[in-house]
Amino acid sequence: MKRITLIVRQTDLNKIFVEGLQLLLEDNSNIIDAVRQFDEEIKKRTKEFPIKKRKSLLQTIYHPHEERFYKQVAVQAYTDSDQFLNIRANVKMPLPNNATIILVPEGGCTTDWEEPVE
């Protein structure tokens, strides 16, 4: 098992997880597994997903048919030794223990925008 910190910079989600969320994941888990677990925690704490017109964080940030993050999503990931992890290029990459991931579902400085798919 490994511990991952997932921080989502989105106003409605920040109200629920002020300092992000510590997740305990299987050793071969990747960012998608972490986001799925984050979504499970949201379900436990709220009656419905707090971002309007969305069902989950995963739907908000990830294109399931093309297996990639949407263009407007900002992604930063690093290890506890400050090594950068390029999870945008490889979403299936197993995350190292004590990694920190910061997701911004709607990055403010992007010009390309994609509507999330169902």
Image: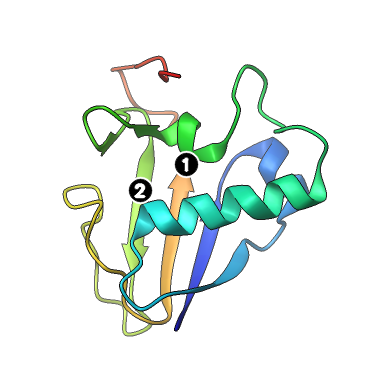
**Eyeballing the image, is 63 above or below 88?**
above
Badge 1: how crowded within 10 Å, few (<14), some, or many (20+)? some
Q: Which quarter of the picture shows residue 43?
A: top right
What secondary structure is marked by label 1?
Answer: strand
**Eyeballing the image, is 79 above or below 49?**
below
**Eyeballing the image, is 68 above or below 9?**
above
Residue 28 horizontal/vertical position (percent): 30, 72
Residue drawn where x is 38% and y is 51% of the image: 32
Residue 8 horizontal/vertical position (percent): 55, 49
Mark identifier at residue 75: 2
In the image: residue 7, left or right of residue 87 = right
Residue drawn where x is 72% and y is 32% of the image: 50
Q: CA distance from mark 2 to mark 1?
A: 7 Å
From the image, tell me which residue sits under label 1: 104
In the image: residue 110, left or right of residue 87 = right
Q: Amino acid at mark 1?
A: Val
Of residue 52 and residue 44, the one placed in the foreground of this image is 44
